[in-house]
Amino acid sequence: MTMNIRFLGAAGEVTGSCHLLTVGKKQVLLDCGLIQGSRKDEERNAQPFPFDPRKIDAVILSHAHIDHSGRLPLLVKSGFGGPVYTHPASLDLCRIMLRDSGFLSEKDAEWENRKRERKGLKPIEPLFTVDDANIAMRKFKGLPYAQKTQILPGIELRLSDAGHILGSSIVELWLDDSGQKTKLVFSGDLGRSGMPVLEDPTIIRQADFVLMESTYGDRLHRTWDETHRELDAVFNDATDGKGNILMPAFAVGRTQEILYLFARYYKEWGLQRWHIFLDSPMAIEATQVFTRHADLFDVETAELWRERNSADLLPNLHISHTPLQSMAINKIRRGAIIIAGSGMCTGGRIKHHLKHNIWRKECQLLITGFQARGTPGRALVDGARHIRLWGETIRVAARVRTIGGLSAHADQLALKNWYANFRERPPVTLLHGEEKSIAGLATCLRQELAAPVHIARPGEVLELDAGR
């Protein structure tokens, strides 16, 4: 009898989520995400998979974020022919995000090959293309929340709302290999209770083994009341200033949350005195997906959505579809709030806005989400005095502020409380976190809940024997 899971990504780090589940002769991947961070980190994406993609029977995707879904086109390109099970909202978001990732991969290869041609070097291939992404999407199968489904002999699956982004799922798996039965729960990325837009993470009561994220396992977020006051001060205090406010934001989840908060506190925060720009084609498309899946909103968001047409939520919102519209924003010297991707400042239109604003001391940069090691966003949070943009060194004079209370990830207390709902304290393996975060959560769970905690290591195999 064989029942185990092998940790192939997001073990001791945050990005590149990928775990290989073996049940008898069946093999299932939990997530297949891109590694993000420094150039050296991202070069690992092109390495061959440490398994035969042709022998994978199915993929279960917890949610659409690219660090969980981003290598699916490469997996299909490498021979995977099975289904990808995920929530229908994640399916719709992946159609946007994987296509965008393929487009960026093509452009990066094109840019690199121009330099290689001048040096007489052989051209490189993109990691995957837009066509590869479109082909991969044909493998997706949507499963609603709370529906238990047999996806393979001996493997039953149920998805539950993780409250992280639209369609994000906690994965419950009932496994049976020749009468040996085990229940495995994979948290995916967990959201926070009481946050705007989405429902709270679903409580799960029973498991034999738990795999749990630990992105913010060593810290507590600011409360929503503190974050509310902080944002109120940012927009009201800055109104009489001479600069702009830049908000790098993830296209899926964070952007929509910001737009909702702007609509809800429009008068209170004095936002009518600003011009608000949404300058991210992918975020614009993702917002349309949110509208189509409004049944997943929490009560307050659904009520606001019903009261006002989504197009009228922010009367001073300007949607920048084209590059020309984006470039026009850089002529504005004051009074603009600019929401743009990418969320970690690694690419996209936010880099152009940084070039035109980050050296101006009257401007502000609001960091609203997690910044991976090796990214420009992380460098700015850590106090970098200069950043490099297209070969130019630019002084950082704008005020950089981290709005930690907007995080879509559960903090240490929320992670502990979610795990505490399991009966009989099942063994919990921590992953999807940097070493300091994982160590902090492990100590918390052991000391406060007497939990049997294991820390996943890259390539490690964990035996799933409920009797042990």
Image (cartoon, rainbow, N blue to C red):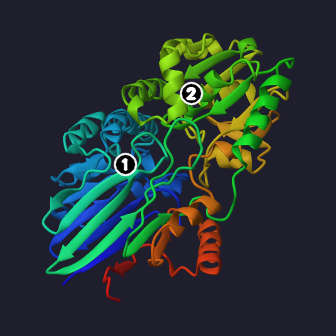
In which image quadrant can residue 347 be found? top right
* Residue 378 locus on image (x, y percent): 66, 49
Estimate the spatial distance between the alpha carbons at disc 2 and disc 1, rounded to whole Å.
22 Å
Of callouts 2 and 1, the N-terminal one:
1
Q: Which residue is mark 1?
A: 69
* Residue 67 locus on image (x, y percent): 44, 51
Q: Is residue 62 visible?
A: no
Residue type indicated by callout 1: Ser
| Residue 27 shown left or right of residue 145 in the figure | left
Relative to 428, is 135 above or below?
A: above
Kindly state the secondary structure of the residue where label 1 is placed. Answer: helix
| Residue 64 shown left or right of residue 41 in the figure | left
Judge by depth and name the residue closer to the eye, 435 or 23: 23
Residue at (35% x, 55% y) in the render:
32
**Mark on residue 293?**
none
Q: Which residue is mark 2?
A: 349
- Which of discs 2 and 1 lies nearer the camera? The answer is 1
Relative to 265, is 59 above or below?
A: below
